[in-house]
Amino acid sequence: MLDLPAPTQLAVPAFTILILAEMIIGWKNGRARYEGKDTMTSMLMGLGSTVAGALTATFYVGLAYWVWTTFQIFDFGAAWWVFVLAFVLDDFAYYWFHRLSHRMRWMWAAHVIHHSSQHYNLSTALRQTWTGAFTPAILIRMPIFMIGIEPAIVFFCAGLNLLYQFWIHTEAIDKMPRWFEYLLNTPSHHRVHHANNPRYLDANYAGVFMVWDRMFGSYIPERKEEPCRYGLVTDLGTFNPLRVAVHEWVGIFSDIWSAKRWKDRALFLLAPPGWTPDGSRMTSDMIRNAWLERENAKKKNTGRKDKSTVAAE
Amino acid sequence: MSLLQFIGSLIAVTIVALIAARMFPNSKSKLTRDRVIRNTARYCPHIDLGSTAPTIFMSETGDTAILAFPNRNDGFAFTTALGDRVVVREVNDTSQLRIKKIETGLSIDMHDFTQPTLTIILQSKDCQALLTALQNHSPDQPEPAHA
């Protein structure tokens, strides 16, 4: 087993320094905003996530190595190009993991934590799940182990991927150069991902390479005329880290408990967040469609008003 | 992660949060009528708030407000200040509320895991008016699922 460092753990002091730097920048020029309790919650979620990760690491690493040794098709070894290949494949797997985390309530229950702040700053990057181990997320990386890349290399690349994603959680940077915006994930693209404006819902899932969103139709650019508002479509009314960590699980269990049919019970886990058998709550698709209808109605009314004004003149 | 690392991290988290609170004080944390209406319109875009000023019961503490939708059958918007941001919950005829009259106002439990009990401090006249409005708006049936 290759002994590689864990990039995110090594970077913890840098995270803290960069958060303090962003606070100073925001305090001076107003381009970043913090709130004490929100920051406390975000960082406690990050700490809890590290503890939860440490508790489940043995199982995950064991499972990954079992799959690798049992099913590997090729033996890639540990040449430099294997690291490059692993990074690209892991980023592709991350895209689908992330997309599923928004489109399947079971996975959303863990990922929702990362979106639960109404602020968007570097501390939001640390607001991570405590319950990822209870989702099918690990299965998404299995094909990479099965083609023959050693799990230690994949986990190392996944760490680098998360490291990259830290700096994009900021409002202090407007846009990067055009070529950079085209190829890579940036603060602008990721602000859209964290926004709860109906126009921006469920978009920009990329980790590092923006090409996946462009390829699979989930790319939405940030628009100057519509600033991002951050948080959930139904924001949390609490800073309590325990409630933040488990609220969606509580919702899922409550829904499954009160469901009358097995099909509904399954769909409360597998359908997108907001799905109900009777349509009494709204999924992100329903929210976007309702918003589009309102926008079209507004345009029609404006058109009529314009015509009547012209007629009156 | 060792216990020492955990304690060290906890101290670092607290220090950073305290610095954040010091550098960015919550000057905007109080609710105003305008803020309540604006946020209600944002959270409940399907509700027509009308052109006339809606009835708003504003807590004397400035952190909670209840807006009665112009068409009473539509229900209410419960608004709370959370840090420097605002959270709104729509209360309609399927919402289950447990309302308790306290000495200074009302304490309302919305059976919502993500929204702890809401306390609204009001003058006794306003308190009675709100209580009547909420009680008149009794749920047809209990909400069967998580909000």
Image: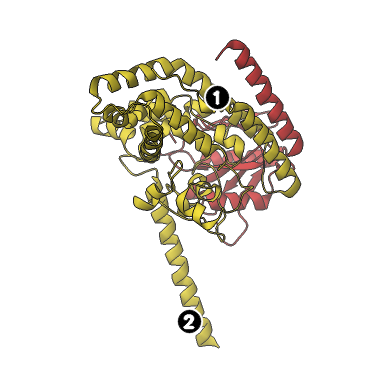
Chain colours: A yellow, B red
Asked whether the residues under marks 1 and 2 belong to the same chain, the reply is yes
Q: Chain of mark 2?
A: A
Q: Position of residue B99 (x, y in %)?
A: 56, 31
Q: Secondary structure at mark 2?
A: helix
Q: Is residue B141 left or right of residue A17?
A: left
Q: Is residue B93 above or below residue B5?
A: below
Q: Position of residue A290 (x, y in %)?
A: 41, 55
Q: Is residue B52 above or below residue B127?
A: below
Q: According to the image, label 1 marks what residue?
A: A9
Residue found 58% across the figure and 62% down from its top? B51
Residue found 43% across the figure and 44% down from its top? A206
Q: Chain of mark 1?
A: A
Does the residue at mark 1 contact the one at mark 2 (Cβ under 8 Å)?
no
On-image quarter of the N terminus of chain A:
top left
Count of numbered labels shown in the rendering: 2
Between B68 and A170, the residue placed more toward the observer is A170
Q: Can you see residue A51?
A: yes
Q: Is residue A22 above or below residue B70?
A: above
> What amino acid is labelled 1 in the image?
Gln
Q: Secondary structure at mark 1?
A: helix
Q: Residues within 10 Å of mark 2 (few under 14, many from 20)?
A: few
Q: According to the image, label 2 marks what residue?
A: A307
User: Which residue of the protein is positioned furthest toward the top in this rendering?
Assistant: B3
Disc 1 or disc 2, which is closer to the eye?
A: 1
